[in-house]
Each structure stands twice: as C-alpha cells, then as structure tokens.
Image (cartoon, helix red, strand yellow):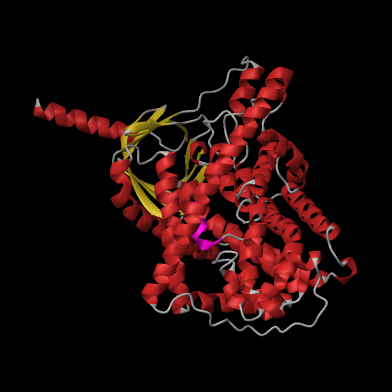
Amino acid sequence: MKKLYVLLFYCVSFFATGQSIEKTWNFSSIEKGDTLDIVDTDVLILNKGKFTSSFATKDSLETSGNYIRQNNLLIFNYKVPKDTVRYYNIVSLTDDSLVLSENSTIYKFKLPVKLSKTAPQKHEKKEASTKIIPSQGFSVESLWRGVLGMISLLFLAFLFSSDRRGIDWVTVGLGLAFQLLIAIGVLKVPFVQKAFELVGGLFVSVLDFTRAGSEFLFSGLVADMDSFGFIFAFQVLPTIIFFSALTSLLFYLGLIQQIVKGLAWLLSKGLKISGAESLSVAGNIFLGQTEAPLLIKAYLEKMNRSEILLVMIGGMATVAGAVLAAYIGFLGGDDEVLRLLYAKHLLAASVMAAPGAIIISKILHPQTENVNTDVQVSSEKIGSNILDAIANGTTEGLQLAMNVAAMLLVFIAFIAMINGILGWVGDITSFNAWIAENTSYENFCLEAILGYVFAPLMWLIGVARQDMALMGQLLGIKLAASEFVGYIQLAELKNIANATHLSYNKSIIMATYMLCEFANFASIGIQIGGIGSLAPGQRKTLSEFGMKALIGGTIASLMSATIAGMIIG
C-alpha cells in the first residue's frame, strides 16, 4: 500500500510538471484570509520564459520579467515595477486551471472564456466599462495630444501675461526641455527610475516608521486597522508630524540647504534666473510654501516683482515633503508595490514642477531687469540645537496636521451640504434623472458642475473623452477646496468597485501629477501671511499677485500632467 501511495504521488507530480504552463491565464481569485476582488481583465501571460501581468483592481498594476520553472516551483524575476525575486509553489495545474501559492496567499487562474458571438451588445459594453484600460505607451496620437496640450497651456499663460513682448522664449524652451528630460528619465530610463525609486523608498520607510508609532498609540482604539478612517487619522496625519520633525532636523544639520543649493545652481545657470529665485524654487521641492522662503529671507525685501511672482508660483506649483509622504501612504495604502509606484510619480511631479513654475512665471511676468545669479543660502536656523529643531518641527507638523484635518472636515462637510441642495433641486426639476441617464454622475452635484466646466481643458491636455468630466471634477475640487480633498476623490475614482470610476490608467497617472501642488484659494492667504511676515514691504505685491500665482501654479502642474500623459500614452 505504501508503494502504491508513492506511485500515485509521482504520477500526480509527473502530470503537474508535464502540463504546459505557458498560456494566457485569467485570474480566478486571490485568497489571503479574505477573497480579493477580481475582474475579467486581470491576466497573467507566461510565454518563452517571460511573464507579464495586469491587475486592474490594484490601479491597473502591470508587472513583467523572466521566470524559471523547477518542478513544482516558479521563480519570478520581476523587472517592472522594481527588481525583485518571488517564489510561487504550483499547487495544481490542468489544461484549463492553475493554482499557485506564496506563503499564505493562494492565486487561482483559469483559461479565458471565449465570448459568444451571439452575446448582446449592451452586455459587452457593460463589461468594458468595469475595467481600467492600461497605458498604451508612447505613440503618434499621444505625441500630438501632448503637443496640443503644451501649446494650449502656454497660450493660456500668454493671455494672462503682463508684458507679452518681454517674454524670453528661449528660457521657456529650455524650461520645457528640462521638464521633458525629467519625465522621460523617470518614466523610461532604467537608471533614473532606480534613482527615483530609491528616494521613493526612503519616503515609504518614513511611512513604516510612522505606522509603528501610530499603532503603539492608537491600535487599541480602532477595531479595523485597514479602514479609511484609521489610515487617514492615524497614518496620514502622523506622517505629516514625523516628516516635519525630520525635515527640521535635516535643515538644522544643513543637509537640505546643500541639496537645494546644487539644484538651484542648475536652475540659475540653465534658465538664467536669479540665485534667490532658484533657491526658493528648488527649496519648494522639499519644503512648504512658507518654509522655502526662509532660504532667501535676506533677499525677499529687495526682490523685484517678477522674482516675487516666481517665489509665489513656486510655492503654489509644489507640495511639501511632509504631505508628499502622506499622499504616498494615502494612494498606495499598505501595498508596498503601489506605494513605491506612487512615490516615484509624486516625486517626479514635484521635481518637474520646478522648471514648470519658472517658465509659467516668466511668461506671466517676464524678467526685464538684470539679476544676480549667485547662489547664496541664508544662514537662517529653525532651532538653537538638534533637540530644539526637532521640537520646533514637531510643533509645526502638529499645527499642519491639525489644519489639514480641520480643513478636510469643513470642506467635505460643505461639499456634502452643497450636493444635498443641488440634489434637491435636481429632484424637483427632474434634472437628476437626466444627469443619471446622460452622464457618469448619478445626480446633480457640485462634482458634475466642476467636471463639465473644466472638461474642455482636460481634453486639450490629452485626457480621454470618457474621463474628461471626472478629471475636470478633480481639478475643480482641488482649486475650490484643497489637493487633499482632490486625492481623496482620486482614491475613490481609481477604484473599479465604485459605480463611477476613471476608465484609463493614463488618467489616474495624470491626475496624480495634476493634484501634486498647493494651488488653491486658501493658499493665497497662506502666502500673503507667511511670506508677508518675512518681508512686510512686499505684502502689497503679494496681495496683487495672489490670483496670478494661483493660475500660474495650476498651469505648471497641468503642464507636468500633460507631459507625463504624453509619454505613458
């Protein structure tokens, strides 16, 4: 009997290893405690020692690389999204099914079911609407849509220019070239991708460190550690506090100043702007719109109007490192691959915003005076010693976190109130039924109004027709409320489980770039108060340029989104 069992074991092993695994497999289910949602477009392709996969339920995550099969073991050497090796056991393999296991996770696959030729057309349309279409790659179509978008945005800035004859188009061209090189490097060049992923990994590590502290303090208060409320209140907000303290420490040690000085030198020499301007713009990559001006505190009072506008637009077009880390955690959740993916794109958006802010600023208010291109960092300190710097950073981070929480509470409540009123109007006028039948919205709401107001602009920058209104909604909400509210809605719109969601992965990536800025109406007051306290003599200029800085920051972020969308296709 024992020999019979051994014989059966080897027979099963033979058939398992003898079956051809090189097929196109559809995900059937993924079980890790609970069963994760799967759609028909989730696929794993094994062909000639190479593999590719797409997973729509994880923001159209695409992976690829090489694989080796050793009996009942599959070794996947991932090249995209990052170099890593993972091991999967073949639990079972038949002509039409495959089951793999990795630790406690079970992956079940099946062969694609061929659609019946007599299937109703309406059903096919419904199925097509439940997936997020992956990026198609750079093409002639994406090129002309991208060029159209860039020309449209430059023309929009030209219309608001205070001196159209004084625009230095050479500086504009060089700035665009800078943005294109950064985008191509991050999205297409492996060693540049590695560099951004390395820095992104540092941000992800900050999230992990913060989570450890958050769980120590709050895990006993919350039953569901993966709920949205816990993630935002006890991961996103503490990340802002911790990163603010870390930034203050690095600033006190002089590390940030040295990095900023190097970037500022490149911007100053390459784009012919003053040293003070370049320091402020480069500083905004890491610091907030009121912290970065500390680098040039000694020069603020002596700056001309063109320089002041660039300081303001630089602050509007970027986000602080503290909230950048928060966005990574918010969009990526607990998925390490997704967090690294969004870290790379958010970092690219922040870096691309620097030359973008310069070219838009110099179109809106050209520099007509001779400027000093020497780069000298202010010796301003934010603490008397290391502990004082950390304490100051913690206090500032706490204030920022509380402001973010209060702002979100108020703005989300106001949006709900406005939507309640608009929904009531839609009910009594029967407009809700028309909205539900003819648009992607269920009823008359603020998001629908903003979406269709900005939809033409979204088409101009390369957004697909199906996503124009939803992308316009995100831009409108970001301007009226804040980028935090915009990212909250983006998190909902990239989830295919929701009835209303974006159709293209390209739109999700473009939205990530578009929202990565502080350009909203509240920021006008923040800049007038914050920068005005450092340079009281410039307060009048700051108030005059408030709306122009808002427009400039928005156009700069839209330029980054346009370029990214053009390249990923």
> What is the x, y in percent for residue 216?
29, 51
> What is the x, y in percent for residue 184?
63, 60
Q: Could you say which quadrant of the image residue 224 lies in?
A: top left
Left or right: residue 307 versus residue 279 is: right
| Circle count | 0
Work out which quarter of the rendered image holds the N terminus and state it: top left
Residue 279 seen from this side: yes
Q: Where is 459 relative to 563, above or below? A: above
Q: Nearer the viewer, residue 261 or 55?
A: 261
> What is the x, y in percent for residue 218?
32, 47
> What is the x, y in percent for residue 306?
77, 72
Residue at image coords 63%, 79%: 265
Q: Where is 428 relative to 563, above or below? A: above
Residue 341 seen from this side: no
Q: Nearer the viewer, residue 551 or 419?
A: 419
Q: Nearer the viewer, residue 58 or 393?
A: 393
Q: Could you say which quadrant of the image residue 92 lies in?
A: top left
Residue at image coords 74%, 40%: 455
Residue at image coords 62%, 51%: 515
Q: Which residues are magenta?
A: 320-327
Left or right: residue 290 versus residue 171 is: left
- Chief SS of the magenta region: helix
Left or right: residue 499 versus residue 27 is: right
Q: Where is 340 relative to 388, above or below? A: above
Q: Where is 560 relative to 101, above or below? A: below
Q: Is residue 323 magenta?
A: yes
Q: Is residue 22 magenta?
A: no
Left or right: residue 526 versus residue 63 is: right
